Image (tube, grey):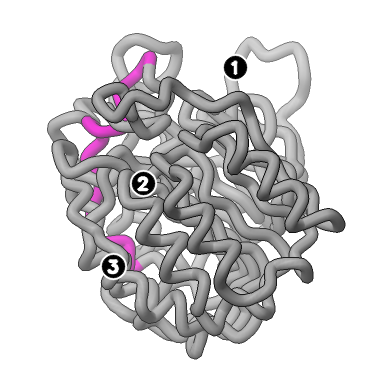
Amino acid sequence: MKILLDPAEQPDHYATYREEYAGLPVAEAPWPDDAKEPRPEAGAVAWRLAGNEWDDGPDEIAGSLDWFFEHVDTAQVRALVIGQWEDCYDTGSGSIVERLVREAGRLPALRAVFLGAISPEESEISWIQQSDVTPLLEAFPKLERFEVRGGTGLELRPVRHESLRVLRVETGGLGGAFVRAVGGSDLPALELLELWFGVPHYGGDAGVGDLAGVMSGERLPALRHLRLENGEFQDDVAAALAAAPVVARLETLSLSMGLLGDEGAAALLTGQPLTHLRRLDVDHHYLSTAMMSRLRTALPGVEVVLSAPENRERAWRFVAVSE
């Protein structure tokens, strides 16, 4: 089972995780009665739970959950993919979180969860209604990988979690309170943190000040891969990282998908050394050709990921994912 992502692996919000998740093949719940293949062993796959009136399977996700807990040896299950639920643009994930928390004793082997693996064809990322995900982390102390898509209604309270190694949050608008809660959580095993900030129009009111806890790294002693992405304030993030204690222990750093410009890149280069990094990802950027060349020259031993610059006119600068 794959817990830590490859540094070069950058998931996107189009991924539905219908074929593979966490290094495991995906099986749908319910398993079709007319399937040509026998139902797989419970721990050999990631189980995908979903419900809507447009696909085969239950109209409501509760039906998928019911079948799963009635027909699968859940004690062996290692990974869950929670896909679309009915009216996910109006109804939050709270009932799903509550059900999983209630059944936590039946899922002792669970190590990976994706909450909201919903493609734009099913619901735009900014429309997905989420909920307080703290109870999931509290109910599953051995969880190692947790990913969530959708920022509306998404909440987190500071927690201590001894096992979590990967935390990924994909949004078109991430609240500052959530970011502060991440930085205020004690996550001694966390190796990869990825946050998509999005835009204010879709609830993205986070600012660089909300990242103080993350930047210090005090509660994240194992952090080696930091992805602060999809933000309008990437120049401010870069400037803060220039002196952030957490940077010295990183192997990879990503400021991709956002509005990083020459000012931010210059601040990053004039701060603490970055030559210890294996990879610096600034894909989807607004850098000049001269600054792109400067980055590569200043970091000869670092894999610097640079796409062609986006339209550098100020009026046409957009994050990669918003609506």
Q: Amino acid at mark 2?
A: Gly
Say whether residue 52 is left or right of residue 163: left
Q: Of the residues under marks 2 and 3, which one precedes in the sequence? A: 3
Identify residue for label 3.
Answer: 156
Magenta part, dominant SS: loop
Q: Amino acid at mark 1?
A: Asp
Residue 259, position as x, y percentages in the image: 39, 40
Q: Residues within 10 Å of mark 1 (few under 14, many from 20)?
A: few
Q: Amino acid at mark 3?
A: Leu
Which residue is rendered at x = 33% and y = 29% of the image?
A: 317
Say whether residue 248 is left or right of residue 48: right
Residue 159, position as x, y percentages in the image: 37, 81
Residue 124 occupies quadrant: top left
Q: Residues within 10 Å of mark 2 (few under 14, many from 20)?
A: many
What label does residue 33 carry, if any?
1
Marks 2 and 3, how far apart in space?
Answer: 20 Å
Q: Of the residues under marks 2 and 1, which one precedes in the sequence? A: 1
For residue 11, say whether it is visible. Answer: yes
Under circle 1, the secondary element is: loop
What span is in magenta? 121-135
Residue 305 occupies quadrant: top right
The front one of 79 and 133 is 133
Marks 3 and 1, how far apart in space?
Answer: 39 Å
| Marks 3, 1: nearer the viewer | 3
Q: Of the residues under marks 3 and 1, which one precedes in the sequence? A: 1
| Marks 2, 1: nearer the viewer | 2
Residue 165, position as x, y percentages in the image: 62, 69
Residue 72 occupies quadrant: top right
The front one of 134 and 291 is 291
Identify residue for label 2.
Answer: 231
The front one of 117 and 125 is 125
Query: Is residue 322 within the magenta segment?
Result: no
